[in-house]
Amino acid sequence: MSKSKNKLLNIEDLGIEYVTEDGTVKAVNGIEIKLNEGETLGLVGETGAGKTTTALGIMRLVPNPPGKIVSGKIEFEGSNLLDVSEEEMRMIRGNKISMIFQDPMTSLNPVMTVGQQIAEVIEIHQDLSRQEAAKKSEEMLELVGIPGSRANDYPHQFSGGMKQRVVIAISLACNPQLLIADEPTTALDVTIQAQVLDLMNNLKKEFNTAMILITHDLGVVSEVCDKVAIMYAGEIIESATLEQLFTNPRHPYTVGLFGSIPNLEEETDRLSPVKGLMPDPTDLPSGCKFHPRCPYAKDICAKQDPNSTEIEAQHKVKCLIYEGLIDAEVKR
């Protein structure tokens, strides 16, 4: 758990839209995230839930056009990132907030050595000479389990797992307070995934770095995270501590996610995944966005957008059941 409990990130009512020829994509709709120093938050959801757009919003990298942050605030260390100049934001990116992108294969420049790519970040943000930056880049490679002597190698000389380690070395080069990892293990096989997660866990403890881990894999969340936020159709529909979410999931969608994971301790003939598909973000359903797929849905769910209800300390659920408007008991 985190050594320090100082508040680092506070997101309120964040809304992000993309204006396309097919209509306005409401990618992120009024989400709230709170993160303390040293904590790790798992941001979980299906493809298209708005996880990556949320991360790009924090980094102020939403492509504009067509994307636009339309509401809310993103407070980092007490100042609203939506109010700072682009020049100030450039000094924050890579220095105080770093991001590991989804595919290490495309994150690295093929014509620069990996050492040059790590050193470049250090030279931009820290007042070091080229020689000192080169030395530090070798130390960063050693830190992620790659011999420093490989600093002069090019990305194509590394395997997928090694490339991901290089990307992690780049993102940690300036010891950021917040690391955003977007599906950092998706392109890797299972044994390499475990190594990369171990590495991230160890580095997090060593540097007390806060982390937002974007994933659709609850197994990965259970290995790394302190808190979890479940995203659906651009909204956070359940947020809780790791223990609360795994022992007592309350939103019908979260329960459905757990129902689609095999349990080695129980004998079942079939899994019970969530029926149907994520809604089209250019044409979201009225009322509760999940109601067309929800086994507990009543007529009111199509009309009324639920509020986020705190059902116990740190555990919030966005569902009319917990506002007392539907009589139903969500069972796992």
Image (cartoon, rainbow, N blue to C red):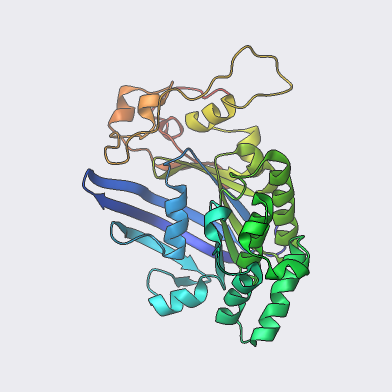
For this rendering, which residue is in front, 216 or 186?
186
- Location of the C terminus by quadrant is top right
Q: Inspect this view and state whether residue 64 appears.
A: yes
What percent of the width, then of the height, locates residue 59?
46, 64
What percent of the width, then of the height, locates residue 162?
69, 55
Residue 266 drawn above or below residue 34: above
Residue 141 drawn above or below residue 164: below
Q: Which residue occupies 28% across, 56% down?
A: 66
Q: Inspect this view and state whether residue 39 appears.
A: no
Q: Quick check: 279 left or right of 245?
A: left
For this rendering, which residue is in front, 81 or 310?
81
Q: Which residue occupies 75% across, 57% down?
A: 202
For this rendering, which residue is in front, 24 or 123?
123
What percent of the width, then of the height, locates residue 1?
72, 55
Q: Which residue occupies 68% across, 79% down?
A: 134
User: Residue farthest to the top?
Assistant: 269
Q: Quick check: 124 left or right of 308?
A: right
For this rendering, which residue is in front, 20 or 320?
20
Q: Quick check: 251 left or right of 228?
A: left
Q: Quadrant of residue 190?
A: top right
What percent of the width, then of the height, locates residue 43?
53, 47
Residue 252 drawn above or below residue 268: below
Q: Quick check: 49 left or right of 268?
A: left
Q: Which residue occupies 29% across, 46% down?
A: 25
